Image (cartoon, helix red, strand yellow):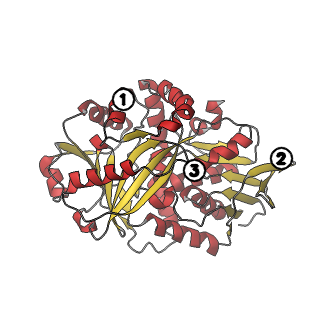
Amino acid sequence: MKNNIKIGIIGAGIQGISNALFLQKKGFDVTIFDRDNPGSHGASYGNAGHFSPYASVPLNRPDVLADVPAMLLSSSGPLALKWNYVPKMIPWFLKFITNSTSKKMMHTAKNMHQILDLALPAYDELFDEIDLDGLVEKKGILYIWNDKDLKSRELEIKVRNELGVEQQLVNKHEIHDLEPHINPIYHAGVFYPYARHARNPKKILSKFFELFLHKGGKFNKVNIKDINFDNEKPILKTETQNYFFDKAIIACGAFSKKLTDNLDENIPLDTERGYHVHFKNCDHLLTRPVIFSNRGFGITPMEQGLRVVGTVEFGGLDNPISKSRVKNLIKNAKHMLGDLPEHEDEWLGFRPTLPDFLPVMGPSKKYKNIFYCFGHHHLGWTLGPISGKIISGMIAEENTNLNLKPYSSLRFN
């Protein structure tokens, strides 16, 4: 099945490449643009590696709002601010506050659940076409907590039960049996046995990219600065060149806002800065990812060692890496696992986040040949293939039994 419709995708992370692969299945001619090579140091490289189909409970909820001041004051807590960025964040925070009612929380949770439920089958469609070579492990994901902030834990469990998310509550003994190396800092937890994790997200992304090229896809390593139009058809512009397409997709994560602003669409996208470090040759200490809910960090056993990930820092795209956040991760890792060797690979990445914690997926407000696929916050890695499948269906004008309205950018206009 071949059609001559040419599609340009801006962004070579998991969203862009997933969009490209599902469009190729429908016979479209696809070119990806990115200023970096796929899998270089963006969010698709540095994430926690979780495939988390259960993660429907968003951060916009009443209990989190009440906890924000305490989180900001705690040096081991999950939240930090770059003070020079606060004035720029105020409009976003105000929208976040209005989205943190119980009703809005349930709206987000329900619409995240709708796509999360389809996330693993969409991955499997792509995994069927590559040699995975042990890069994905099906050992579940474990969350643990102590007896502080229990109301938040109860809320998460209750909402997931209402949505029909399968979860196993585990006690101290069961946690110890699953992960004997963890210090006894926990009182209880929840285990998601069907969740998976990546042993190396970058390698998986690279295999998807090789598949895309093998199927005739094209890649241009250039920075798209702007989009113009010729008879409603998009022209992707660098500083020196123009590329002509029938349709285009903006899928460059936290960097998407520069382009949507140029299209006169005011989408309140901002970034949650996330960090990671590795402890080399320690991946035998854990069998699966473990997240310590109270401090908002997790550790995933990977080829590169134990990857310690976490913290949310509001500070935009231009501020340098915060040494205090890196120290915080190291301290938290040692709190969980005791003595560890010297850490390596300090990394900072950007999670593209909207104040209602739903992604933007669908056509632009003014331009019917421009599609958006960004804003997946902490779930970009999990939701790449299902998002690509949804957008490819929209572009092919197929009918769907999904309610896609909640993901439209029109909700902000």
Residue pictured at 18% horizontal, 36% vertical: 147
Residue 357 shows up from this direction: no
The residue singled out by tag 3 in the image is: 253
> Mark 1 falls on what kind of element?
helix
Name the mark on residue 312: none
Tag 1: amino acid: Pro
Residue 305 shows up from this direction: yes
Q: Nearer the viewer, residue 233 or 194?
A: 233
Name the mark on residue 232: 2
Label 1 – label 2 distance at C-alpha: 47 Å
Q: Residues within 10 Å of mark 3 (few under 14, many from 20)?
A: many
Residue pictured at 44% horizontal, 72% vertical: 132
Q: Residue furthest right?
A: 231
Label 3 – label 2 distance at C-alpha: 24 Å
Q: Residues within 10 Å of mark 1 (few under 14, many from 20)?
A: few
Q: Nearer the viewer, residue 147 or 196?
A: 147
Residue pictured at 38% horizontal, 72% vertical: 134
Earlier residue among tags 3 and 1 = 1
Q: Vertical placement of 22 versus 76: above or below? A: below
Q: Residues within 10 Å of mark 2 (few under 14, many from 20)?
A: some
Tag 2: amino acid: Glu
Provide residue 354's location: percent of width, then percent of height.
Answer: 54, 38
Name the mark on residue 69: 1
